[in-house]
């Protein structure tokens, strides 16, 4: 009886130690890339997933087939940037619902309301946390750039 108790305690200790070892193991890093969104124009990736966290690089209003900023001003650029982001999210098996944080960079903070109107067409519920800033200059003369952090997996909002 005491031998079986010792055996049970030993098994429990082994299980606990193996879970601690697996928790301190290496992290899983996956590079996310899709031809449906513009290629990176520098030494970075469209997105990087580490375990269940997805980091989406800043998207500007590039047309993926021409690699030029779309014409039509900040509204058209915001629509294209978020469309590009949607394709990257899809490549990581996510949707806009998985996004938990965005950062919006604007060439002119006075464009905030116009970009916000476009933003609500893509983020229709479960809005992520967000920051918005005016930047001195954005790549390729863009008027808006949007980056995101998402959680990969089945996500449920609890209010």
Image (tube, grey):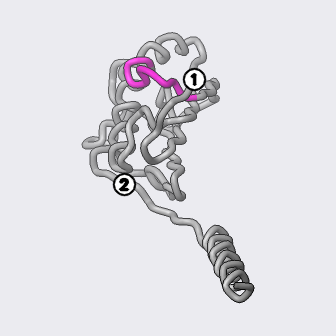
In which quadrant of the rendered view does residue 12 lie? Answer: bottom right
The image position of residue 129, as x and y in percent, is 60, 28
> Crowding near pointer 1: few (<14 within 10 Å), some, many (20+)?
few
**Could you tell me what secondary structure mostly forms the magenta stretch?**
loop
Looking at the rendering, the stretch of residues picked out in magenta corresponds to: 120-128
Task: Tell me, for residue 33, which label it has, or none.
Answer: 2
Residue at mark 1: 159
Furthest residue to the left? 65
* Outermost residue, bottom side: 3
- Kindly report which numbered mark, 2 or 1, lies closer to the viewer in this rendering: 1
Residue 91 is situated, as x and y percent measured from the top left of the image, at 33, 49
Q: Is residue 9 left or right of residue 71?
A: right
Q: Is residue 74 visible?
A: no
Residue drawn where x is 51% and y is 44% of the image: 151
Considering only vertical position in the picture, is 30 above or below 129?
below
> Which secondary structure, mark 2?
loop
Secondary structure of the residue carrying tag 1 is loop
Q: Which sits earlier in the primary sequence, circle 2 or circle 1?
A: 2
3D distance between C-alphas at marks 2 and 1:
33 Å
Question: Residue 123 colored magenta?
Answer: yes
């Amino acid at each position: 009886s005491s031998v079986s108790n010792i055996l049970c305690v030993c098994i429990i200790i082994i299980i606990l130690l193996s879970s601690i070892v697996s928790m301190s193991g290496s992290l899983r890093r996956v590079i996310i890339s899709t031809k449906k969104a513009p290629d990176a124009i520098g030494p970075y990736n469209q997105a990087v997933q580490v375990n269940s966290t997805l980091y989406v690089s800043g998207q500007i209003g590039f047309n993926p087939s021409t690699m030029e900023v779309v014409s039509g001003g900040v509204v058209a650029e915001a629509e294209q940037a978020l469309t590009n982001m949607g394709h990257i999210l899809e490549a990581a098996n996510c949707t806009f619902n998985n996004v938990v944080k965005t950062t919006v960079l604007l060439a002119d903070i006075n464009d905030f309301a116009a970009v916000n109107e476009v933003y609500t067409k893509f983020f229709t519920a479960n809005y992520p946390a967000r920051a918005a800033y005016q930047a001195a200059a954005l790549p390729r003369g863009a008027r808006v750039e949007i980056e995101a952090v998402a959680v990969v997996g089945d996500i449920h909002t609890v209010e």
